[in-house]
Image (cartoon, rainbow, N blue to C red):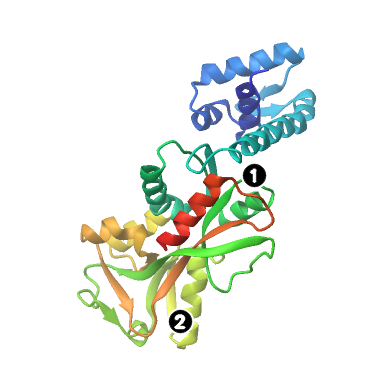
Amino acid sequence: MDLIKLKSFLAITELGSFSRAAEVLYFSQPAISAHIKELEYEYDTKLFNRIGRKIELTKSGEALVYYVESILDTFEESKKAINSLKEAGLGELSIGTSSLPGAHLVPEYLSRYKLQNPEVTFNVTISKAVDIREMVLKNKLDIGIIGSQDAEYKDIRLEEKIIDRDEMVLAIPNTHVLSGKEKVSIFDLNNLELIVSFKNTLSRQAINKLFLKYDVPYTIKHEINDKAMRIAMVQNGLGCAFFTYSEIKREVNSKWFSILRIEEETLYRNIVLIHLKEISMSPTVKSFCNFLIKAE
């Protein structure tokens, strides 16, 4: 049985859509449909029902999910076992990353490592930091590269190492009264109108901590979780917002808005490398971890 058929089945199950599964797996939708038809022929049963535009598993499909996950997990474990016998710089690295480092920092890390080790291949998963931690703990990923705060809970089963620090700066409209300055006191930001992300984000927690520490009040003008929209709103004069510098480097260089740094404190988002403590790493995983640590 071709494993890609099983991957197609699992992708449709998780995404609830043939078209989205096709996008994720880089197949055409007819090819994905053909994979499922072949599986249904092999098992002699229907695996999905279409209810309007919705896709649902049949009872047979529900029963198959556990076995497909088990087969694919076993296949990944076998790949890791073989990779562990290869020399450093060969084989595949499975990396999990949260969205911020994944979009702005990890591609540079991979590019520089690839220059030294052209034979290595990367399998990258982008998800929330908490999900990446969980996948590393379950040994579904070799390593994770995620954003983290110093005070964040650390799991004793994971080895964690800061490999980079991304400075947080305040983006302000070019028309703002403080525009043109490079640094300001936190007290100059009294009653600042801020555009912020949702409460449970690391950046929101860092902002709250900063203003509380100096007892400086601020006003939440808008609460928006989409980074691109927050950037556009600052550019259009609708408020100010904190970002890590790597997130807005292009916009700053294009002079879409101005940035300020705080005199009293420099804020950073730590970029952390995580992996299981009690596990034998392949030479390539070890090599890549050492590369990241030395680059810090």
Q: Secondary structure at mark 2?
A: helix
- Cα separation between marks 2 and 1: 39 Å
Which residue appears at 57% of the width and 51% of the height?
143
Q: Secondary structure at mark 1?
A: loop
Label ID, residue 211? 2
* Amino acid carrying mark 1 in the image: Lys
Q: Which residue is mark 1?
A: 140
Which residue appears at 62% of the width and 28% of the height?
7
Front-most of residues 12 and 6: 6
Residue 296 position in % (x across, y down): 42, 63
For marks 2 and 1 on the same chain, the one whose residue lies earlier in the sequence: 1
Question: In the image, which is nearer the foreground, mark 2 or mark 1?
Answer: 1
Tell me if residue 111 comes above or below residue 203 in the rendering. above
Q: Is residue 19 visible?
A: yes
Tell me if residue 2 comes above or below residue 80 in the rendering. above
Looking at the rendering, which quadrant does residue 53 occupy?
Answer: top right
